[in-house]
Amino acid sequence: MLALVAGVAVWWQQEHAYYEPVAFVPGQEIRLMPIAGDTPEVIVAENVTGIDADSSPLRFRACFTTPLSQAMLTETYRLYDKPTPLVGPSWFSCYDAGEITRALESGTALAFLSEHLPEYGIDRVVAVLPDGRAFAWHQMNECGSAHYEERALPDGCPPPPAKGKN
């Protein structure tokens, strides 16, 4: 019985305990990184819903729609190399990591760099489908992976924070 209670507690913590709704107010809109420049730009995003948790910089997930075409987006914003949608909690039903992954692998969805986050080595990624449905998540980039795995940083990575600061 104790194992069952512990199992339920672990499941509840992973699925529900830390998540909070995200408010997409001015200054926290959906943004993409332009091809020419290093300052993310706000894009048209409608029906935005999202969740996040303070327990990890990788728990952010969002769903929205955009009237912007994939063709316009690819001419204006940076594509993201190696997008890997992370699985979200099952109750956040608009976000299906499996569906997003399949769409990315087939080339139906395109992934863009939204922005580099303040946490070292973490990026916000946005994937857009041809019908305008779009999804966002946080993912560790190559610099972050190397840093946290204590490997040599790839060329071009910014210096990591001092030990104990991320």
Image: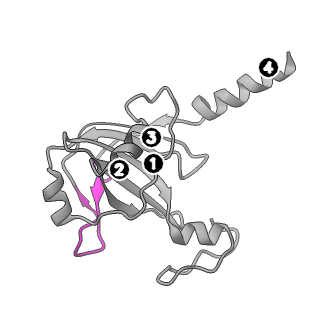
Q: CA distance from mark 2 to mark 3?
A: 10 Å
Q: CA distance from mark 4 to mark 1?
A: 30 Å
Between label 2 and label 3, give the one nearer the viewer: 2
- Mark 1 neighbour class, 10 Å CA radius: few under 14, some 14 to 19, many 20 or more: many
Residue 143 placed where, x, y %?
A: 53, 72
Residue 131 placed where, x, y %?
A: 19, 39
Q: Residue 104's mark?
A: 2
Disc with the residue nearer the chain's start (1 vs 2):
1
Q: Which residues are magenta?
A: 26-42
Q: CA distance from mark 4 to mark 2?
A: 38 Å
Secondary structure beneath dot 2 equals helix
Q: Are marks 2 and 3 in contact (CB under 8 Å)?
A: no
Q: Quadrant of the N terminus?
A: top right
Q: Are marks 1 and 2 in contact (CB under 8 Å)?
A: yes
Question: Which residue is tagged 1?
Answer: 85
Amino acid at circle 3: Ala
Residue 28 placed where, x, y %?
A: 33, 50
Q: Indicate whether 97 appears above or below 11.
A: below
Q: Residue 4's mark?
A: 4
Q: Indicate whether 138 appears above or below 149.
A: above
Question: Which residue is tagged 3?
Answer: 97
Secondary structure beneath dot 1 equals loop
* Residue 2 as seen in the image, left or right of residue 90: right
